[in-house]
Amino acid sequence: MSMDWNWFFSSLSQSAAAIVGIFGAFIITKIFSNQTLFLAKKSKLRDLLVQAQRISDNANSFNVGWYNDNFNKSGYRDFPVELEESFPRGEDLDEVTDEFLENYIEKKTSLSTQKLRM
């Protein structure tokens, strides 16, 4: 029986084609899964950008200058010191009544008007 080289080369080419086909299938599957993942992330990013724009619009509607002028004055920054002097044992902050707060604000307001008159 004589060996025919055509069988060898035919089998070799078919095996190579099968291996190339298997690798190609893996690569195409990976591309499709990456594309799906990319589209999901793109959609999530778009939603987050819309949410960030909504938060930015809400933040722009606040009047920070007015807040700082009326509630964050330097004269009111010593309020924690006033609390410690009035409640030295560190009682519960529920004991800080509206009357205590009004007296503090009235005292600070009268001091600031006295400084303006001078």
Image: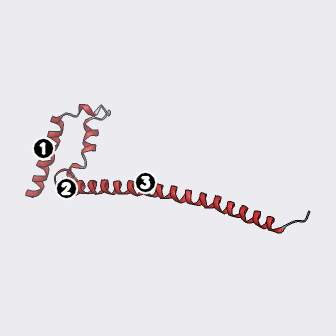
Q: Amino acid at mark 2?
A: Ser
Q: Which mark is residue 106?
A: 1
Relative depth, front residue between 44 and 59: 44
Q: Nearer the viewer, mark 3 or mark 2?
A: 3
Relative depth, front residue between 46 and 95: 46
What residue do we see at 10% from left, 53% from top? 114
Q: Position of residue 41 (x, y in %)?
A: 43, 55
Dot 3 or dot 2, earlier in sequence? 3
Q: Position of residue 83 (x, y in %)?
A: 26, 39
Q: Position of residue 38 (x, y in %)?
A: 46, 58
Question: How far separated are the C-alphas under marks 3 and 1?
Answer: 58 Å
What residue do we see at 80% from left, 64% from top? 7
Task: Rate crowding at label 1 as few (under 14), some (14 to 19) or many (20 or more) other CA atoms within 10 Å.
Answer: few
Question: How far separated are the C-alphas under marks 2 and 1?
Answer: 30 Å
Q: Amino acid at mark 3?
A: Ala
Dot 2 or dot 1, earlier in sequence? 2
Relative depth, front residue between 46 and 93: 46
User: Which quadrant of the figure has residue 116?
Assistant: bottom left
Relative depth, front residue between 20 and 74: 20
Q: Element type at marker 3?
A: helix
Kindly identify which residue carries mark 3. Answer: 40
Kindly identify which residue carries mark 2. Answer: 61
User: Which quadrant of the figure has residue 99?
Assistant: top left
Q: Nearer the viewer, mark 2 or mark 1?
A: 2
Q: Amino acid at mark 1?
A: Glu
